Image (cartoon, rainbow, N blue to C red):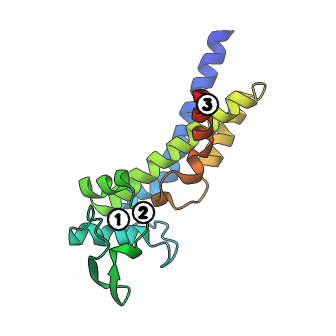
């Protein structure tokens, strides 16, 4: 009986990865011709990372440096929010679109496993298929993934802090 439950749990996890793959399938098929979420001019993280990479300023933290010809004028680096080094390394290693896609996959996987762990820790009697589907739904929440792992990391971070105490 326990071997059957193990295979059932393993199958649910494979099914959830398949659904995550389906979520990113249009990006894999269409490549750079696919649609990605860029909220507006205020949250133009993708465009800013791309321009910083093109201008060679990706790891330049001098606030007095100026980027020419952006948003109809110039922009001081001091007006750009926090640049997360992990995302900057992705933009350095890959082209901008691939870096965005890899970052989005990593953020959503962390969100999936973090929420799955939360549900397993606090709702022990919940069926594993429900845990996987709820975790999958949570990981596919439309967020700006270039801001880092923000809300998707919250549950895993809380569990990590709880284990440290």
Of the two numbered discs 1 and 2 on the same chain, state the one appearing first in sequence: 1
Of the two numbered discs 1 and 3 on the same chain, state the one appearing first in sequence: 3
Horizontal and vertical percent position of residue 126: 77, 29
Structural crowding at the residue carrying mark 2, measured as other residues with C-alpha within 10 Å and reported as few (<14), some (14–19) or many (≥20)? few
Image-based side of 2 in relation to 109, left or right: right
Q: CA distance from mark 2 to mark 3?
A: 38 Å
Of the two numbered discs 2 and 3 on the same chain, state the one appearing first in sequence: 3
Image marks 1 and 2: residues in contact by CB distance under 8 Å: no
Residue denoted by label 3 = 12
What residue is at 36 percent from the left and 90 percent from the top? 72
Of tags 2 and 3, the one toward the viewer is: 2
Circle 3 SS class: helix
What residue is at 47 percent from the left and 79 percent from the top? 41
Q: CA distance from mark 1 to mark 2?
A: 26 Å
Quarter of the image for residue 124 reads: top right
Indicate whether 33 appears above or below 123: below
**Observer-nearest residue: 88 or 113?**
88
Quarter of the image where the C terminus is located:
top right
Disc on res. 82: 2
């Amino acid at each position: 009986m326990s071997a059957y439950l193990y295979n059932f749990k393993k199958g649910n996890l494979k099914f959830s990865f398949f659904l995550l793959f389906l979520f990113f399938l249009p990006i894999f098929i269409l490549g750079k011709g696919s649609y990605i979420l860029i909220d507006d001019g205020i949250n133009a993280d993708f465009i800013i990372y791309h321009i910083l990479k093109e201008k060679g300023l990706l790891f330049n933290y001098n606030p007095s440096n100026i980027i020419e010809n952006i948003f109809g004028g110039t922009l001081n680096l001091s007006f750009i929010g926090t640049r997360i080094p992990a995302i900057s390394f992705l933009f350095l290693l890959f082209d901008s679109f691939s870096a965005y896609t890899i970052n989005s996959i990593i953020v959503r996987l962390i969100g999936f496993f973090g929420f799955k762990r939360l549900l397993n820790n606090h709702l022990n009697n919940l069926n594993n298929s429900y845990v996987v589907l709820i975790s999958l739904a949570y990981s596919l929440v439309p967020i700006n993934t270039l801001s880092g792992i923000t809300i998707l990391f919250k549950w895993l971070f809380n569990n990590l802090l709880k284990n440290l105490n």
